[in-house]
Image (tube, rainbow, N blue to C red):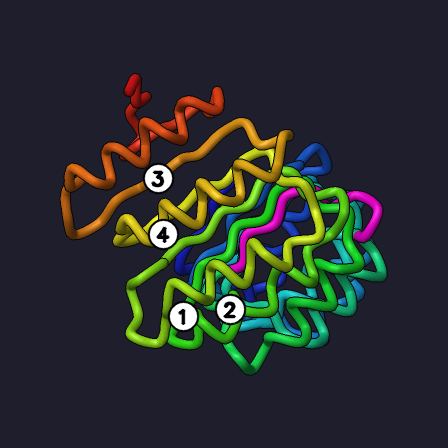
């Protein structure tokens, strides 16, 4: 179910939503009106969400996590904060396998690292911001052992990013990734780092690249061919690359 631009301060509206006992997936976007005064109403609901997309709402993520979101498997949000991070670890550390965090910056860096390090994630997508280099530099040290798939959105979008930041991430990576998704303006330096990681990680199987702002140059196409030689499934701009 998707609920957008809705004022939920009217209890009958919220009660109507919470009456759907079979509700497993919820997308809340730009909604308002849920307060801590309605906590009892939320906590009495029999809903146990499995998937939650929580974007730009005027109430905290923690209110949902601590009531109808205690068994989440998948979460996408741009509203991660300390309280939400603590609730996720308390209630969802054994169930959450898929996490997408939009706008990871220095203000939530420690919260984010603590959350992913203590989780059992299989899939993690990080949508970067202006401090992308700072975030990437230390990310590899905090990835959970269970992680198989990593997605990075916004590479090269910001001036603060350097190719060394990605190199540090993969050099420090304490898990054996099976796939990597990257979204941004990618060049040959980036592909060299990916290729070096593939050479030392025999479990790696898939590389997906969503390219922005430029086409492929000859040296980059040659690097993609080298990557394919290792039996890697390569998807470029969502189209299977058969190089």
* Residue contact between numbered discs 1 and 3, judged by CB atoms under 8 Å: no
- Magenta span covers which residues? 93-101
Compared to residue 131, the image places residue 234 above or below, namely above
Residue at 40% x, 60% y: name it: 5
Q: Which residue is mark 3?
A: 209
- Of the pair 137 and 48, the residue shown nearer to us: 137
Compared to residue 54, the image places residue 82 above or below, namely below
Decide if residue 9 is on the left or right side of residue 218: right
The quarter holding residue 208 reads: top left
Give whichever of discs 1 and 4 has the lower sequence position: 1
* Residue contact between numbered discs 4 and 2, judged by CB atoms under 8 Å: no
Q: Which residue is mark 4?
A: 190
Q: Which residue is mark 1?
A: 129
Distance of mark 4 from mark 2, alpha carbons? 21 Å
Per the image, label 2 sits on a secondary structure element best described as strand
Distance of mark 1 from mark 3, alpha carbons? 19 Å
Per the image, label 4 sits on a secondary structure element best described as helix
- Of the pair 165 and 135, the residue shown nearer to us: 165
Q: Which residue is mark 2?
A: 104
* Residue contact between numbered discs 1 and 2, judged by CB atoms under 8 Å: yes
Residue at 55% x, 45% y: name it: 150
Compared to residue 80, the image places residue 182 above or below, namely above
């Amino acid at each position: 179910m998707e609920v957008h631009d809705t004022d939920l301060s009217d209890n009958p509206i919220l009660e109507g939503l919470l009456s759907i006992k079979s509700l497993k997936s919820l997308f809340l976007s730009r909604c308002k009106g849920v307060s801590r005064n309605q906590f009892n109403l939320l906590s009495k609901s029999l809903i146990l969400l499995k998937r939650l997309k929580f974007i730009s709402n005027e109430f905290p993520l923690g209110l949902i996590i601590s009531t109808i979101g205690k068994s989440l498997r998948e979460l996408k949000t741009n509203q991660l904060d300390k309280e939400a991070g603590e609730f996720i670890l308390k209630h969802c550390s054994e169930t959450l396998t898929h996490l997408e965090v939009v706008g990871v910056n220095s203000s939530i860096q420690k919260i984010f690292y603590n959350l992913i390090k203590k989780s059992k994630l299989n899939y993690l997508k990080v949508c970067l911001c202006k401090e992308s280099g700072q975030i990437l530099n230390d990310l590899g040290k905090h990835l959970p052992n269970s992680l198989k798939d990593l997605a990075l959105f916004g590479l090269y979008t910001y001036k603060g990013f350097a190719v060394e930041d990605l190199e540090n991430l993969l050099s420090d990576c304490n898990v054996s990734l099976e796939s990597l998704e990257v979204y941004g303006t990618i060049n040959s330096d980036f592909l060299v780092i990916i290729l070096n990681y593939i050479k030392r990680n025999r479990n790696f199987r898939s590389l997906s690249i969503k390219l922005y702002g430029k086409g492929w140059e000859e040296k980059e196409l040659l690097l993609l061919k080298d990557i394919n030689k290792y039996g890697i499934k390569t998807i470029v701009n969502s189209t299977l690359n058969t190089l």
